[in-house]
Image: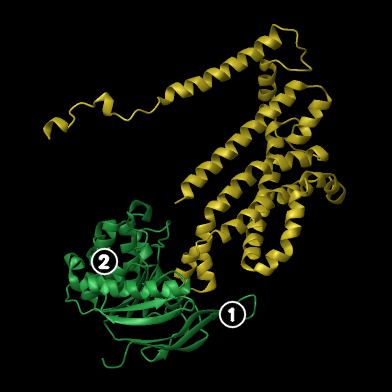
Chain colours: A green, B yellow
Amino acid sequence: MSAPLIEVKDLTKIYPSRDGNGTLALDRVSFDVKEGEFISIVGRSGCGKSTLLKILSGLLDHTRGDVTLKGRPIDGPDEEIGVVFQSPVLLPWRTVTQNVLFPNQIRRNLTPEIRARAKTLLETVGLGEFGDKYPRELSGGMQQRAGIVRALVQNPALLLMDEPFGALDAMTREQMNLEVLRIWSQSKKTVIFVTHSIVESVFLSDRVFVMTPRPGRLAEIIDIDLPRPRTLDMINSDAFGRFTGRIRTLLDSEGDLGG
Amino acid sequence: MSELAPQTPDPALTLASPPKWRERGMSLAIFLILLGTWWAVTNLGSVPAYVVPKPQDVARWLWVGFTAPLSHPTSLWYHTGVTMWEAFLGFVIGSVLGIVMGFGLARWETAERVLYPYVVAFQALPKVAIAPLFVVWFGFGIEGKVLIVVIITFFPLLVNSIAGYHAVEPERIDLARVCGASEFQTFWHIILPSAAPFIFAGLHMAAVISLLGAIVGEFVGARAGLGLLLLQYNNAMQMGGVFAILIVLGALGFILNYAMQKLEAWLSY
């Protein structure tokens, strides 16, 4: 348990640009993530948080630096990494169960155990009755829960979530946050959660990575030592307010500098 | 709560939809009025039969045409069969070519950019203008007609396949990549079904215009087919025969349209 699950060292990403100088999206970002941690990355748009997540999920290559999972470099999609997207990305011509099993169908490992696991997971998120329904018959929150189950079926070591609840209404969002914490505490997965909601980041995480734009930098890592399990009334506590205030100050000051 | 449980349906709470039989009845009434007017003008008025035939004459033409033996030169079954075969063959070949080339161009962006000006230029050309040329090249057989149908059905499928390919949500592609999908798997499981509504819209259009292509091809020069027969009747001033063929063509177009609609509804998600 001592060696970190993920090690990121001096990660730099430069997008090619027309003037030949390139656009610096990530500037020497370094951090470690331990197994079982819940990490949130928070920042304004353009701070590189989505770029960072895309690199971690193996969808995007990086320019310089090292990114490793369990000591081996991440240089492409990895079975040990589950990804939850901004929108649920359920395929409308497949039932919920078929959607959830899609990654395993692609990897040609649709075993009876996997099917049973998918069924159990759907039940734990309250979708047990909906396996044979089509995505359009589900509400937005239910669709995103199916999206989370799809990422979990293969039992990944790391779960990457890219602003998964941005499109949901505030009340559904709170419900989903509690749901994610419940799944996380039961499965003991490592989670990296990208969000632009400061409250969400503090509520969910062990540590919050605050990123600032132009160029994308990791400004500060904030330890959230609020007790677990977290409850919604903690959001109104003084301790909680101090964390959100601290993060807001960091984001505001850098935002002014960036113009 | 008991007073809210409706024992008998409350008319104020019943979702009303206009009765279907009334709309159907109105459609039928319009048809009968048109038919009646037609009958009155041609039977009681002074419109000559070489301008507008009497409805009963057209009905007789249809009856005689469809009861004549297949080998007979005026058999409507035979000529309808020839035209439909040309349209069908052309539709299948043109659609398949259009879909394959459309996805090919969309997949290889350089090819799309290099070839698209030609596609646009060729699409802007009224394709039926090529029909006389095909008579010279391929003669009076069905090959030239099939080729015209191929050309005119090719474009809706080409354009719609390209549009369908580009309309696939990028996140769906990301999903496939995260799962380690091969290029073929991505195409088969994500791109093809995502683009299906576009392709069906193209097929729908192609099915209807395939008939147009076959008829125009036959006008220009053919040995058989409804277009040829129509032209012969027209030249002989036999308006009853012309109207009979127009009714057959109208019915074929209607059936094709209806069949494609049903197919689309059945296969859509």
Residue type at mark 1 is Gly
Tell me the crowding category of disc 2: few under 14, some 14 to 19, or many 20 or more residues within 10 angstroms, Cα based.
Answer: some
Q: List x then y, in percent, for residue A173.
A: 29, 61
Camera-side mark, 2 or 1: 1
Mark drawn on residue A22: 1
Looking at the image, tell me whether mark 2 or mark 1 is earlier in sequence order.
1
Q: Residues within 10 Å of mark 1 (few under 14, many from 20)?
A: few
Q: Secondary structure at mark 1?
A: loop
Would you say the residues marked 2 and 1 are in contact, meaning their CB atoms lie under 8 Å apart? Answer: no
Look at the image and tell me in which quarter the N terminus of chain A lies. bottom left
Percent position (x, y) of residue A109? 38, 75
The one of B228 and B220 positioned closer to us in this rendering: B220
As helix, strand or loop, the secondary structure at mark 2 comes to helix
Q: Is residue A5 above or below residue B176?
A: below
Q: Identify which residue, A5 or B216, lies in the foreground.
A: A5
**Outermost residue, left side:** B2
Whether labels 2 and 1 belong to a single chain: the reply is yes
> Which residue is at a point 17% across and 28% down the rendered structure image?
B7
Q: Residue A55, relative to residue B251: is it above or below?
A: below
The chain carrying label 1 is A
Residue located 71% across and 45% down the image: B86
Which residue is drawn at the image coordinates 48% and 24% (left, top)?
Answer: B24
Report which quarter residue B242 is drawn in.
top right
Drawn side of residue B9 relative to residue B60, left or right: left
Structural distance between the alpha carbons of marks 2 and 1: 37 Å
Residue at 23%, 63% in the rendered image: A123
Q: Which residue is mark 2?
A: A177
Which amino acid does the dot numbered 2 rest on? Asn
Residue closer to the observer: B221 or A21? A21
